[in-house]
Amino acid sequence: MAGEIPDLHAEVRAGAGKGAARAARRNGMVPGVVFGGDNDPMSIQIPFNVLLKKLKEGRFKSTLFNLKVEGQDDVRVICRDVQRDVVKDLPTHFDLMRLRRTSKVNLFIPVEFIGEDVAPGIKKGGVLTVVRPEVELVVTAGDIPEKITVDLSTLKIGDIVHISDVTLPEGAKPTIDRDFVIANISAPSGLAASDDDDEVEETEVINQKDETV
């Protein structure tokens, strides 16, 4: 279960329709609507600067939020759409969908790497290359994992970790239908260069023997 679901604070918006939405924008707010679940749609608004900051942070449309509105019960929501000004590309309206605990949702889950200090490949100078620090999974809203864990303790230089090598939480599955790479342990550049030098030296020795013969 996820340790913390970020809060998203909003206010109830008086009135509905284009007139009320324009009034909200004049007051520095972005109008929005919460829909779905067992309740009627509710008109809300969020300060423009707050929403813009969250959009710039990224993943706004794939993050599960705990929506907090004064006078209302907290509810889990996910963004379904953000309308933007066609010229300025700034948010003008947003739609949030309420989620039941059994709802399926796509979320980016962080990857934790353990066993790096004892991994044979790293002990020999190998370098851990993280290809995906987070993975997009289809998960159940009521059972969202805080992270997925990758054990590096037995990996050698040249080993690759695919998504199929990772034990995912029950009920979760990747959104990408292929066995993609999570990380790998590669040889350090110095070692690779040394190997190349050895090959050149060996070739020269062989050539010298051929000339002698």
Image (spheres, rainbow, N blue to C red):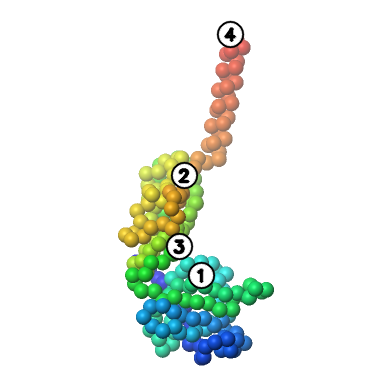
The amino acid on which the numbered mark 2 sits, given as a three-letter code, is Ile
Which circle's residue, 3 or 1, is located before the other in the chain? 1
Work out whether residue 143 or residue 206 is closer to the camera in this orientation and state it. 143
The amino acid on which the numbered mark 3 sits, given as a three-letter code, is Phe
- Helix, strand or loop at label 4? It is loop
Name the residue beneath numbered marker 2: 185
Q: Separation of disc 2 and disc 3 at Cα?
A: 23 Å
Q: Separation of disc 4 and disc 1 at Cα?
A: 72 Å
The amino acid on which the numbered mark 1 sits, given as a three-letter code, is Phe
Which circle's residue, 2 or 3, is located before the other in the chain? 3
- Residue 164: percent from the left, percent from the top? 38, 49
| 43 displayed left or right of 212 | left
Q: Separation of disc 3 and disc 4 at Cα?
A: 65 Å
2 or 3: mark nearer the eye: 3
2 or 1: mark nearer the eye: 1
Q: Marks 4 and 1: CB-CB under 8 Å?
A: no
- Helix, strand or loop at label 1? It is helix
Work out whether residue 27 or residue 110 is closer to the camera in this orientation and state it. 27
Which circle's residue, 2 or 1, is located before the other in the chain? 1
- Helix, strand or loop at label 2? It is strand
